[in-house]
Image (spheres, helix red, strand yellow):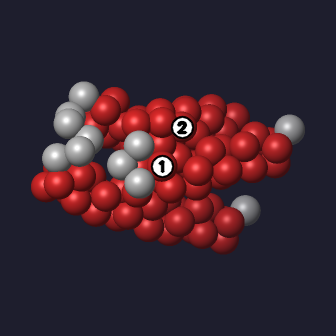
Amino acid sequence: MLTLLSWIATIGSIIGNIGVIKKKLWGMQIWTFGTAIWIVYAILTHNTAQLIMFCFYECLNIFLVQLDIYSDLRYLIRCNLQFLLLLLNLLIWMVSLETK
């Protein structure tokens, strides 16, 4: 079940990020949904570091949806933040694999 849940979250996150890159509101909505699945996954696997990171993601998503997503400066800032958070996510995931 956890493997299926992680695949659903991964696919949702990737599709959502593609939508965000294309400046589509549905991209942000799918990305937010994918992050919610990652929060559930982190709770089920007792991974506190990922839980904190994904909660931060979700707060960022909710805040960014309220901004004008078509403003170039805000959009550039959001894309950079998302990229940095994605790198942080990959780093935490790799470290969690090492510790299992």
Q: Residue at x 28, y 62 (%)?
A: 80
Q: Position of residue 17 (x, y in %)?
A: 48, 53
Instruction: State left or right for residue 52 relative to residue 1.
Output: left
In the rendered structure, find residue 57 and report the number of the disc placed on it. none
Q: Position of residue 47 (x, y in %)?
A: 59, 45
Check disc 1: other Cα within 10 Å, few if <14, some if 14-19, many if 20+.
some
**Pointer 2 and pointer 1: residues touching (CB < 8 Å)?**
yes
Q: Quadrant of residue 66?
A: top left
Instruction: State left or right for residue 15 relative to residue 85.
Output: right
Q: Position of residue 6 (x, y in %)?
A: 72, 47
Q: Residue at x 45, y 61 (%)?
A: 86
- What's the amino acid at mark 2? Ile
Q: Quadrant of residue 22?
A: bottom left
Residue corresponding to mark 1: 19
Quick check: can you spot residue 51? no
Q: Residue at x 20, y 34 (%)?
A: 67
- What's the amino acid at mark 1? Gly
| Quarter of the picture holding the N terminus | top right
Q: Position of residue 46 (x, y in %)?
A: 64, 40
| 24 and 59: which is toward the camera | 24
Whole-number angstrom distance, CA of label 2 to CA of label 1 = 8 Å
Residue corresponding to mark 2: 30
> Residue at the left extreme?
73
| 12 and 23: which is toward the camera | 23
Which is nearer the N-term, disc 2 or disc 1?
1
Q: Quadrant of residue 99?
A: bottom right
Q: In what element is the residue under mark 2? A: helix
Instruction: State left or right for residue 17 relative to residue 4.
Output: left
Q: Residue at x 62, y 35 (%)?
A: 37
